[in-house]
Image: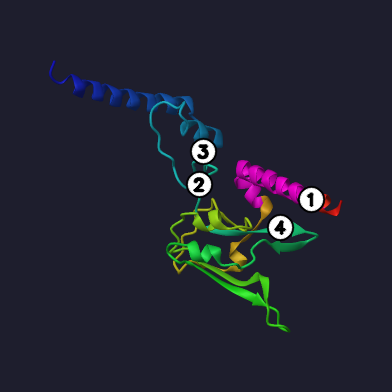
Amino acid sequence: MNGKGILKGLSVTAKRFIDSYLEDVRWLGKRATPEKIAFRSSKDARGTFTVQFPEEKLPTPEEFRYIPFLVYDEAEGNKEIRCTSCGICAKVCPPQCIWIVRTNDPETGKPIPQPAEFYIDADICMNCGLCAEYCPFDAIKMDHDYEIASYSRNILNLDKLMKPASYYAEIRPLNNRREEEARAAKAAAKAAAAAARAE
């Protein structure tokens, strides 16, 4: 029969249209609850829906990546930045939006493994994540904060880029757990090798 495909397509559209209103009735009075948004964006939801941004926001997946940030560890009230200013992130960056200035010892003039200045031009950054992938010290990670629009140029300096390791554990719990287990295994292997040499 001619036109059978068109009727099938229209029936799918009509079903989605009706299901959308049935779901709206089901969630009546719960406009911007996180539970509703998580369900409506899941595979179990029926119909289609519109997120009323900025009142409603879709939950960000763990692997979502936006602008990079620098991780620091908190030890006895001090911020110990993981970055050693090796420059690998700046080398692998495709749009070349990362600039690093190394710290030098004022007496000897030798480099200190810590950045004096670190800049990322967020307007140029393409959010590829290569800087975080190639960092050998797990010092640079991709953030979930995508609301950074401004009227001026978005060049982020060291102060704006630094965030604690606890923040990273909060936004990416599974990745953080894997990295901590790998770090602990590496430290245990190093200690075992040192103990074997001492014997």
Amino acid type of the residue tagged 2 in the rendering: Phe
Name the secondary structure under disc 4: strand
Classify mark 4: residues with Cα within 10 Å, few (<14), some (14-19) or many (20+): some
Does the magenta run of residues contain 122? no
Range of residues picked out in magenta? 167-194
Which disc number belongs to residue 126? none
- State how far apart marks 4 and 3 are (Cα): 35 Å
Q: Earlier in the sequence, mark 4 or mark 2?
A: 2
Question: 181 and 72: which one is in front?
Answer: 181
- State how far apart marks 1 and 2 are (Cα): 35 Å
Number of the front mark, 3 or 1: 1
- State how far apart marks 3 and 2 are (Cα): 22 Å
Q: Earlier in the sequence, mark 3 or mark 1?
A: 3
Residue to which mark 2 is pinned: 64
Name the residue at 53% across, 62% down.
89
Amino acid type of the residue tagged 1 in the rendering: Ala
Q: Earlier in the sequence, mark 1 or mark 2?
A: 2
Q: Earlier in the sequence, mark 3 or mark 2?
A: 3
Does the magenta run of residues contain 171? yes
